[in-house]
Amino acid sequence: MLLEPRDLSVKTAVRLGDSGLGESVRVDARLETCARERQIYLKPTASRYSRSRTLLRSPAGEPVLSQDVYRVDPPWGLGLFGDIDRMVQACPEWRTTAARSLTGRAVSGELVDRWETALDGFAGDQSVLLRHVVGEPADLAGDGPAGPAASVDVTLVIRVGDLVTVIAPGPGTIADRIDGTGPGMSYPDLEALGRRAAARLCPVANSAC
């Protein structure tokens, strides 16, 4: 049901797993916070049970990929994908302010998050690939940047029958950077990964495909 190290082009050394009962399907906690702040009503998609796996480069290394698989009741996550679309439409850009450290002192910085649907319909019965760009936090006092440079991460959400999987490649494992460079999985690689994930769900989904 879950992806294996052989399914990835990036080498992994350790697998961590967990399971749960009656949990809500979680896609992107920060995107959900933005949507609720903008008065978007979200009805949680509850699961009967779930399994999760995190693949690490080494015992003390960074995560290569995290995956959650949820078994949901009919209408089988239909509302989930509608909510994802509504959240992205409501939050193409979100600005927040927080205290950050700059040369040993605390400054007030503005962080800019941006979300977009990079791909959809590439695997299973329903699928979407969310692209999340975190902009460089500006120092509101005007003394320069107050934190790290911009970063990009992606999340794949795929439904096969009554199974929904949420896949989050770890930092440094995708090739998509602000300047368009960097090692890791490209968008074609991510599409192929989504199709492999869907194929693993097929035999145990209701109905099997």
Image: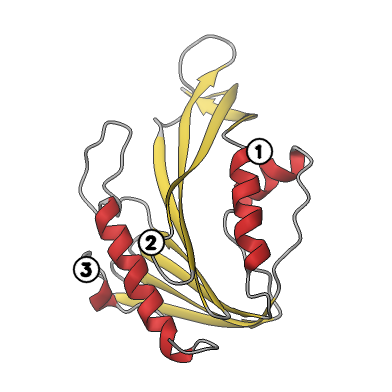
The kind of secondary structure element at disc 1 is helix
Q: Quadrant of residue 161?
A: bottom right
What residue is pinned by disc 1?
Answer: 90
Q: Circle 2 — which element? A: loop
First of labels 2, 1 by sequence position? 1
**Does residue 54 appear in the picture of this structure?**
yes
Q: Residues within 10 Å of mark 2 (few under 14, many from 20)?
A: some
The residue at which mark 2 appears reads as 122
The residue under the point 58% across, 24% down is 110
Query: Local crowd at mark 1 within 10 Å, few (<14), some, or many (≥20)?
Result: some
Going from N to C along the chain, the mark reached first, 3 or 1, is 3
Res 11 label = 3
Along the line of sight, the residue nearer the viewer: 178 or 139: 178
Q: Nearer the viewer, mark 3 or mark 1?
A: 1
**Residue 132, image x and y in percent?**
47, 43
From the viewer's perspective, is the residue at label 2 or at label 1 nearer? 2
Secondary structure beneath disc 3?
loop
In the rendered view of the protein, which quadrant contains the C terminus?
A: bottom left
Q: Amino acid at mark 2?
A: Phe
Estimate the x, y position of residue 129 in percent, counting from the top left: 44, 54
Report the Cα–Cα distance between label 3 and label 1: 37 Å
Query: The disc labelled 3 sits on which kind of residue?
Result: Lys
Instruction: Indicate the position of residue 164 as horizontal and vertical percent values.
Output: 54, 73
- Cα separation between marks 2 and 1: 23 Å
* Picture quadrant of residue 71: bottom right
